[in-house]
Image (cartoon, rainbow, N blue to C red):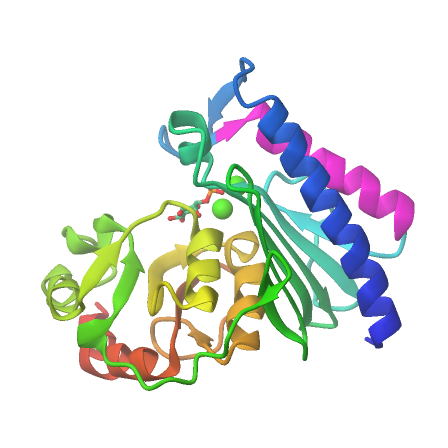
Amino acid sequence: MNKITQDKIYNKAKEWILEAGKTIRTKINDPIEIGAKSNPNDLVTSMDKNTEKYFLEKIKSTFPNHLLLGEEGFGDEVKTLDGIIWIIDPIDGTMNFVQQKRNFTISVAIYNNGIGEIGLIYNVMEDELYYAKRGEGAFKNDVKLPPLNQATVLEESVIGLNHLWLCENKLVDEKIMQDLVKTARGSRTYGSAALEFAFVAEGVLEGYLTMSLSPWDFAAGMILVNEVGGVTTNIDGKPIKLLEKNSVFAGHPDVHERILNDFLAKARK
Ligand code: IPD
Ligand code: CA
Ligand code: CA
């Protein structure tokens, strides 16, 4: 994608994500319809649906050839990586949105033939916009984020992960995950995968890992983390498949290597 096209799409994506976030902030105390999807804790609201429909309408009227892969399913059925695809999570952290009215994001990624061109993650209530354009680095509210090139050790790192992986589960040995948490300086759970990716890019988390995410959870975050020199793989150290569910591990290169070799290699069931 040439720079003119990249900038044109970025400018629209930025305008729409800020506008969508403003609408959510304005309506944050209005009554909302809350439903459940795969299980009683997998929430969806009228706000998730309306936000995705807003992007659908904007994208299709401005860029009729672009495709939309959105969590709530109003977009296209995307089966291949051909063409320009917007991958959108209209609200990442819906449980936080419902219960806390904070710590949720809108995540928007634009891929061209499978290459991540633009990623935006908007922390709505904080009015903090993280974005990256391929080859230009990553930014938070237009301030460039420094590259993750300072040597770092796990013992001085803060790692993002869901507490569930410290309990008995089918995918990883919880004892090894507990060792990981004890070895790191600290661990945090924010409840929005996209926000945790943005924090890795910002260098306030040295790693974020989880066992199952969907494309809309990680598509924008991967672009941000890659632009600051971070590493993003699945928990086996293999490349993430963009259109599938994956385990995900994003981090500072030093910390990523250490956790992969000393913990995850042994933890996988
Ligand atoms: C969820 C959040 C959460 C992660 C879940 C996701 P949603 O997204 O990102 O942090 O642990 O796996 O499904 O449902 O709030 O968009
Ligand atoms: Ca999500
Ligand atoms: Ca969502």
Residue furthest front as drawn: 143
Split into 4 quadrants, where in the image is the C terminus?
bottom left
Instruction: Describe residue 242's horizontal placement relative to residue 135 as left or right.
Output: left
Q: Position of residue 254 (x, y in %)?
A: 32, 84
Residue situated in front as seen by the camera: 88 or 104: 104
- On the image, the x and y values in percent for residue 73 come to 65, 40
Say whether residue 139 is left or right of residue 68: left
142 inside magenta stretch:
no
Characterize the magenta stretch by its predominant secondary structure.
helix
Residue 56 included in the magenta stretch of the image: yes
Q: Residue at x 33, y 78 (%)?
A: 256
Q: Position of residue 102 (x, y in %)?
A: 44, 35
Q: In what quadrant of the picture does the N terminus appear?
A: bottom right
Q: Is 54 above or below relative to 246?
A: above
Q: Which residues are magenta?
A: 44-63
Which residue appears at 34% of the width and 71% of the height?
235
Q: Please determine whether, in this image, residue 216 is positioned above or below residue 30.
A: below
Picture quadrant of residue 199: bottom left
At horizontal 26% and vertical 64% (from top left) the residue drawn is 158
Is residue 241 visible to us here?
no
Which image quarter has ligand 1?
top left
Residue 190, placed above or below residue 50: below
Image point (37%, 45%), residue name: 191
Does the image show residue 6?
Answer: yes
Q: Position of residue 128 (x, y in %)?
A: 55, 49
